[in-house]
Image (cartoon, grey):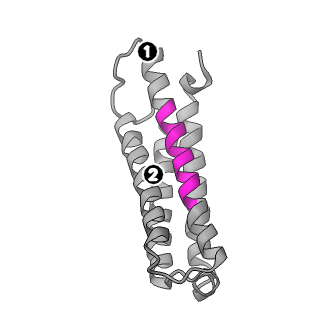
Amino acid sequence: MSIFASPQFLSRVMWLDAASCAATGALQLLPGDALARWTGLPNALLVGTGWFLLAYAAAAAWMASRASAPRRAIGLVVLGNLLWAVGCGALLLSGALNLSALGVAWVLVQAVVVVLLADLQWMGLRASSLSRGGRQLAAG
């Protein structure tokens, strides 16, 4: 059995996703306007996405805590993570904001992390399906 097909793999990846989103959301909310000044990102964008990330972290933690991985929900998480990365890339490529080096790094790190998480989640979903003879698991 591959590590990706382990029953705990998806749960652990979802806990990692929840923790990274909770940390990022808190960092976007706690320093107030300071992060906006340091990064060049609009404070409204940081606050809005900070609250979204905290709510998402709660949902990801709920998925991680299930005895059986909610496969459809995790599939939506994979899509959401990829869309987040696309949004980060679009923000950087648009040139609409005067980002500092820290701002560019803040957005790039988020894009890279969510792509890595999406990849791990996808591999876990695929491996767990294959390890069960290709049958679709019941959605959680």
How packed is label 1: few (under 14 Cα within 10 Å), some, or many (20 or more)? few
| Figure quadrant of the C terminus | top left
* Residue 61, magenta (yes or no): no
Toward the top, the furthest residue is: 133
**Residue located at (43% from left, 50% from top):** 82
Q: Position of residue 53 (x, y in %)?
A: 49, 63
Disc with the residue nearer the chain's start (1 vs 2)? 2
Q: Position of residue 81 (x, y in %)?
A: 45, 51
Where disc 1 sits, the SS reads loop
* Residue 119, magenta (yes or no): yes
**Residue located at (62% from left, 72% from top):** 27
Amino acid tagged 1 = Arg
Q: Classify 135 as above or below 78.
A: above
The residue that label 1 is drawn on is: 132
Looking at the rendered structure, the number of numbered marks drawn on it comes to 2
Overall secondary structure of the magenta section: helix
**Residue located at (54% from left, 38% from top):** 120
Q: Classify 56 as above or below 5.
A: below
Residue 67 visible, this angle = no
Q: Which quadrant of the view contains residue 13? A: top right
How packed is label 2: few (under 14 Cα within 10 Å), some, or many (20 or more)? many
The residue that label 2 is drawn on is: 81
What segment carries the magenta color?
Answer: 110-123
Amino acid tagged 2 = Asn
Q: Where is residue 2 in the image (x, y as percent from the top left)?
A: 60, 19
